Amino acid sequence: MTERIVLAYSGGLDTSVAIGWIGEATGAEVIAVAVDVGQGGESLETIRQRALGCGAVEAYVADASDEFANEYCMPTLKANALYQGHYPLVSAISRPVIVKHLVKAAREFGATTVAHGCTGKGNDQVRFEVGIQTLGPDLKCIAPVRDLALTRDKAIAFAEEKGLPIETTKKNPYSIDQNVWGRAVETGYLEDIWNAPTKDIYDYTATPEFPPAPDEVTISFEAGVPVAIDGVRVTPLQAIKELNRRAGAQGVGRIDVVEDRLVGIKSREIYEAPGAMALITAHKHLEDITVEREQARFKATVGQRWAELVYDGQWFSPLKRSLDAFIEDTQQYVTGDIRMVLHGGQAIVNGRRSETSLYDFDLATYDTGDTFDQSMARGFIELWGMSAKVASGRDIRVAGK
Ligand code: ARG
């Protein structure tokens, strides 16, 4: 029987050419798999037809947008995950869900190998292949761009020679990856890290310099997950989409960073994640009133480690799973409403309320009638500073000798 290879298919030039390229190089039949993670653009049916037109023996499309929002974006939100303090893991969290569908398709169509269109320099190859090794240990991986020398020039020549139903003239100078959680743009003019991004780079966000009137929004959460916007019930996917639209119109969520890739390279990245950044800001502020201090401090460390693991392609790892359990436990009381104003590139919280809040007005107030016994503070401070005071006495004694 002819060998079968499942290819992660985006509908773009590289993966369209990869169908025939892999076929010629290996003699295998190629099954194209396109996964909808809320990236917008062309319909899945258009993409499916193109895959068939480019020589795929089967084309499988999966609508994973709700699955992606519920099982990948929501854990990222609960962790307040920002890699290196900036990046909400847009591409990093989409790879594991795509891997799930690739492995499923490989089983369904009897494929022995999974292929993806990544280069050998980035994180995404690692995320795909580590994911596949974990979920389908018997499956092999190949990357035509990396392993079969499929360069951009060769791709264009191949498409033209074979008359593939794909645009080869429209040249985009950037490498772009997008889904409902955000958009990542890299390479080209951006590789000079002193160059400011030009306007044409952005798609999810409007220029924050000329914002429309301020937009006040109330986001309601239950156990760390957004459930309503301005009182209207929403699914996680709807919440992200609605905030992409409203925060995007205000230019919220633009990020310009040089980040540390897993492969040891520092690289310039432009992200726009209006919905994700508005949600993370709101969620963090709700945690500030509902999560106990020591748990909150520890959770910040856990969230950072979680972000690193996910960035580094360890979505399906035991440590990531254990950290998920901790994070989930902290979300029990993260229920309530956050009111924020979206304007001029910023999402600024100006009100919060929760039935499960730890904020105690009677303890906090400076007005008369507070329930806090200030006389206790003196003794507390005396003991709190004792250890450092004893050490400093020793320093003085030793220095005096
Ligand atoms: N550097 C980011 C990451 O590793 C974004 C990668 C986006 N991928 C792309 N092909 N443009 O998560």
Image: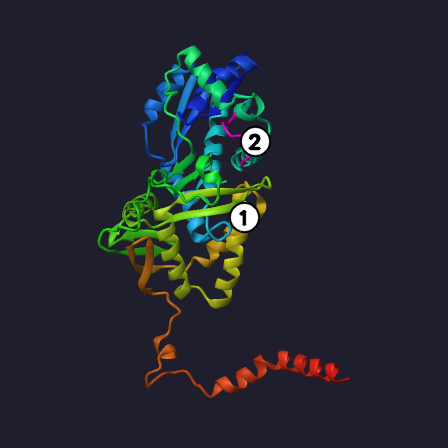
Where residue 224 sits: x, y (%)? 39, 55
The answer to whether 236 is drawn above or below residue 351 in the figure is above
Q: Residue at x 36, y 83 (%)?
A: 370
Label 1: element kind: helix
Name the foreground residue: 105 vs 76: 76
Q: Which residues are magenta?
A: 115-122
The answer to whether 338 is drawn above or below residue 263 in the figure is below
Where residue 157 sits: x, y (%)? 46, 15
Residue kind at label 1, given as amino acid type: Glu
Q: Residue at x 51, y 30 (%)?
A: 118
Q: Earlier in the sequence, mark 2 or mark 1?
A: 2
Q: Most extreme residue toward the left, as rendered?
A: 213
Name the foreground residue: 112 vs 349: 349
Pointer 2 residue: 120
Would you call the spot at circle 2 few (<14 residues within 10 Å), some (14-19), or many (20 or more)? some
Pointer 1 residue: 308
